[in-house]
Amino acid sequence: MKKLVLICVPLVLSGCGVGSQSPATTPPDGTTGGSSGGGTQSYPYNPNMNASEDADIRTPYYGEWVWGMAFPDGSVSVGRMSIARRVSPLAGMTNASAGAAVWCVSKDECPYEREIGLIGTKTTTGKSELFAGMYPDQAYQWARFIGLDADGLVGTEINGQPTLVGTGSWQYYMGSPSTTVGFAMTQRSTNPPVKAVSVGPSPALTSKPEISGANLRALAPSELRERAIAAVNKAF
């Protein structure tokens, strides 16, 4: 089984970008729109694993993503990300973007609706991996979920849509035991439902992203859940 390491990367998502970085222009509808240095942006833009920050001005993984997460006991949860703002370069992270995220245990139970979803490449001790993560909104000191794509490539396994599949680690609370999970996620559209991302650990920032989990199981294709189950079974 691949060893999984939870990464703890402080994130500050705001209208001013990260630190002194100027944020890439984000188109209003996820398909065409704003430019930086000329030209029109178009989506999707889903780079494969890359330890170097891409010179492309677009927001990587911009759009709405849904995922299935399978636990060793056979249960499957679903989640949703609205990736809307580029946050890299950050230490150990490239081509990364973030946005609002939600995780639902069942159709009517979505305990985490104010989380941060993150997709990008992380590099640790010279090894790079394409990953997706979900962080609690309040501090960014630990990841509730980290999933590592199996081959570092954005595939099209599910309905021909951009897809990530692999194994990961889920931790309910900081300090609680982590659980190995299988995951599969796919990009439903290049129009993120929650575009305004203005959050951070500073007490002065009160605006937090929230994304609904309503009808999420209907949005997540059955094949997504099936591939998540296959991934966790392969890990054991």
Image (spheres, grey):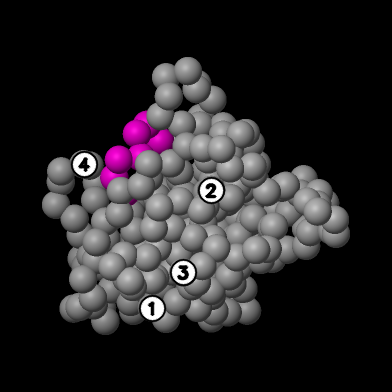
The quadrant of the picture occupied by the C terminus is bottom left
Q: Which residues are magenta?
A: 137-143
Mark 4 or 3: the one toward you:
3
Which residue is identified by label 2? 87
Task: Give neighbour class at mark 1: few <14, some 14-19, many 20+ (Cα, 10 Å).
Answer: some
Tell whether label 3 touches label 4 (CB within 8 Å).
Answer: no
Question: Mark 3 vs mark 1: which is more N-terminal?
Answer: 3
CA gap between label 4 and label 2 equals 23 Å
Asked if the residues shown at circle 3 and circle 1 are in contact, with their CB atoms under 8 angstroms apart, the answer is no
Relative to the observer, which residue lies in front, 223 or 146? Answer: 146
How far is disc 3 from disc 1 in space, using C-alphas?
Answer: 16 Å
Kindly identify the amino acid type of the residue bearing the numbered disc 1: Ala
Circle 1 sits on which residue? Answer: 150
Name the amino acid type tagged 3: Ala
- Answer whether residue 228 is magenta in the image: no
Going from the N terminus, do you reach mark 4 or mark 3 first?
A: 3
Q: Mark 4 to mark 3: distance in Å?
A: 28 Å
> Residue at point 35% right, 47% down?
9
Which amino acid type is marked by label 4?
Met
Residue depicted at x 62% and y 73%: 161
Prevailing SS of the magenta stretch: loop
Looking at the image, is mark 1 or mark 2 earlier in the sequence? 2
In this figure, which residue is indicated by the disc labeled 4?
174
